Each structure stands twice: as structure tokens, then as C-alpha cells.
Image (tube, rainbow, N blue to C red):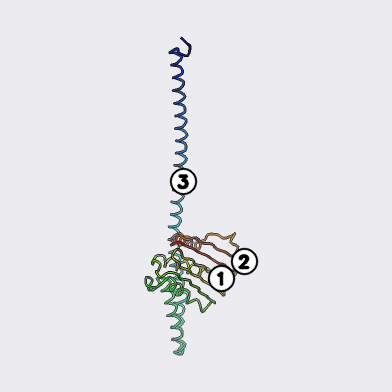
Amino acid sequence: MEKWQDPKVIAIWITIIVVLIFTIILFVVKIMHAGYKRMTEANLREAQTQLEHQKMLMETSLQAQEKERGRIAADLHDSLIGKLTLIRMKSQIGAGLPEIENLLGESITEARRISHDLTPPLLEFSTAEELIEQVLHPWKEKFTLDFYSDVRVSGDLSPDIKIQLLRVVQELLTNIIKHAGATEIKVAFRHTEKNIILSVNDNGRGFDTGQLKKGLGLNSLEFRMQYLNAKYRVKSAPGKGTTTFMAAEI
């Protein structure tokens, strides 16, 4: 009988093959386990990152609400209450009726602007184009302000989208008024079947975007962009004004 036909030799070869197969299976299982572990850890890290991002956006939202309350309170104190106090003083010293009526008219205008900032009237029944025009209108006395619109649809945006869009415009206007030192502002709005596009440009002092830091204003702006599922870009340079461009699919 040939040596390779010896049952002991066959048993040894079978054992070697079984051990080899078991080793290969064990090796494959370990590779799969390591891959699954890496994938699970990556998913956990991604979920943690998303959770932290959502937490940051929520905190930013709350901070933005407090900021808006502070802005309204400042408007009431510095503008409206100041004018009403002046009217009272003028009345006490016997100022003429035309002067008092003029101050009352300015106070009513300020009250309407503040009220509009809080909740735009007829939000559900006004188009986004009309609402943006209403937000911009009070500032036409202080700036050379041009508004261009290109609406290519018959339908309208939802109230939630419109209010966030208005808050973006208000946020950008506030930044221009406080920091830009601008005299001219150009706002362009396009609404098509697939997207909405907004650009706000000023001729102010500008800044180096490479040194741009995310303060509350920019965090608030980013939060609203996230809500609108929009992408945005800020283009600026010292002495060359600033342009903010936003595009959102709908």
C-alpha cells in the first residue's frame, strides 16, 4: 500500500486541511469584525457630531431669539421712547402743534416698523417679494436702496420659509447698519419653481473674509440657512463693500 494511502497519513492531511480552513475562517471573521467595529465607531462619531451640531444650532436659535428681543427693546428705548419723551417735553414747554404732530408722526412710523419686525402683518397673504419690500421700505430714507425681484412662479412660499427669509434680510440689514458704514444697499430676490436666491450688497467699508469669525450674528445667519436648507457665501474686501449670496432649493 502506498504511503499516501495510509489511513494515518490521510487523517493527518484531513486534520491539516480542517485546521487551515478553520484558521482562514477565523481570520476572515476577525477582519469582518474589525471592519464592522470601525464602521460602528465611525457611525457613532458621525452621530455624535450631528448631535453636537444640532445642540449648537439649538443654542444659537435661543441666543438669536434673545438677541432679537434685545434689539426690539433697544429700538423701543432709543427710538420710540426717546421720541415720546421729547413730545412730552415739547408739550410741557408749549411747543407749537405742527412740531408736536410731526414728532407724533415719526413715533407712529417707528412703532409700525418695530411691530413689523416682530411679526410681519398679513404674512400668509403677502408674497415673499412684498414682505421683503416692506422690510426694506423704512430704510429708504437713510440709504440709497434698490430692490430687484424676479418671480417666475404663480405659487408662494410657506409662511415658515417666508419668516426665515425675512429674518435673513433683517439680520443682513442690521449688520450693514451697525458695521458697514454704507450709503448704498442693493437687494436682489429670485423665486423660481426649483429655488429661491437672495443677494444683499452694500458699498460699505468691507472686511477681510479670511479673518471672519463666527459671532452670534453669523451663527444666527447660519441657523436660518440650515432651516432653509440653503447655501450661502460672503464676498468682501477692505474698502470694497460686502455681498452676501444665498441659494436654497425648494
Q: CA distance from mark 2 to mark 1?
A: 12 Å
Q: Which residue is mark 3?
A: 45
Q: Which mark is first along the chain, 2 or 3?
A: 3
Looking at the image, tell me whether mark 1 or mark 3 is earlier in sequence order. 3
* Residue 112 in which image quadrant: bottom left
N-terminal label among 2 and 1: 1
The residue sitting at 50% across, 64% down in the picture is 246
**Mark 1 is on which residue type?**
Asp
Numbered label attached to residue 157? none
Dot 3 falls on a residue whose secondary structure is helix
Which residue is painted at 51% across and 79% down in the image? 141
User: Badge 2 is on which residue?
Assistant: 238
Residue 40 vs 125, above or below: the answer is: above
Q: Is residue 241 above or below residue 2?
A: below
Residue at 60%, 62% in the rendered image: 208
Q: Secondary structure at mark 1?
A: strand
Q: For the residue carrying disc 1, how many other residues have a C-alpha within 10 Å: few (<14), some (14-19), or many (20+)?
A: many
Q: Residue furthest right?
A: 239
Q: Which mark is residue 202?
A: 1
Residue 157, image x, y percentages: 40, 67
Q: Residue furthest top?
A: 1
User: Gap between marks 3 and 2, in whole Å?
Assistant: 39 Å
Label 1 – label 3 distance at C-alpha: 41 Å
Q: Amino acid at mark 3?
A: Arg
Quadrant of image for the C terminus: bottom left
